[in-house]
Amino acid sequence: MATVKYSLDEFIHDMEVLLKEQPDQHRIFDTGSSYLEKLIANPAAIPEEYLVPMGKGSRSNHGSYALYQGESGLLITSVVWGPGDHASPHDHCTWGMIGVMGNHLTETRFRRVDDREVEGYAKLEQDRSVEFSSGEITLLIPEVDEIHQMDNFTDRPTVEIHVYGNDLRGLNRSRYDLESGKIIPFVTEKYDNC
């Protein structure tokens, strides 16, 4: 008996049907994670050009590709972390699910422990650090558990599929300097393929 593979189009359809029902965040994560698990088990579902680093420009060791943007706000991207790639602590300002499609990636989560009274300042404490492997999923909960740092400590690229409730392009987000406590505002302007 042949194994049935789950496609990107099927994942998009299933997620859009789910979001149309306006579920609470728990249901999005519970049901959406099961869909994402099936997708990341099938690397052939993603076009090959979105599974490798860009190979040029200032972030040649990295790749960030938009795979789908829906009217519901659903955004699906492929992110490729080259060997030694690093993203400092940052937030997302929307719910998210991240599934590792190939290799390993270390995610370090932080929580804010300041009173948020001082503008432009945040005191963060490390909450946990986990190495995620192929087939594993991590969840981002806005304002509760979403500040993370990503590191590829391996000697080969790591591919992830990111699923968000809103397009990150244009969202006012923040990076966090762990030493000074400074909050650095930023906006994602584009992906490597658009």
Image (cartoon, rainbow, N blue to C red):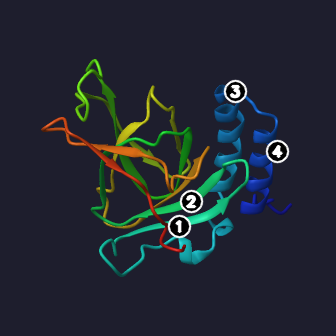
Image quadrant containing the C terminus: bottom right
- For badge 1, the amino acid type reads Tyr
Would you place residue 37 above or below residue 130 in this image? Answer: below
Q: Are marks 4 and 2 in contact (CB under 8 Å)?
A: no
Would you place residue 71 above or below residue 17 in this image? Answer: below
Residue that mark 2 sits on: 77
Classify residue 22 as left or right of residue 128.
right
First-in-chain label (4 vs 3): 4
Residue that mark 3 sits on: 24
Farthest residue, direction bottom: 56
Would you place residue 26 above or below residue 49 in this image? Answer: above
Occupied quadrant, residue 148? top left
Q: Where is residue 150? Give x, y as percent.
A: 35, 49
Residue that mark 4 sits on: 17
- For badge 2, the amino acid type reads Thr
First-in-chain label (2 vs 1): 1
Tag 4's secondary structure? helix
Residue that mark 1 sits on: 65
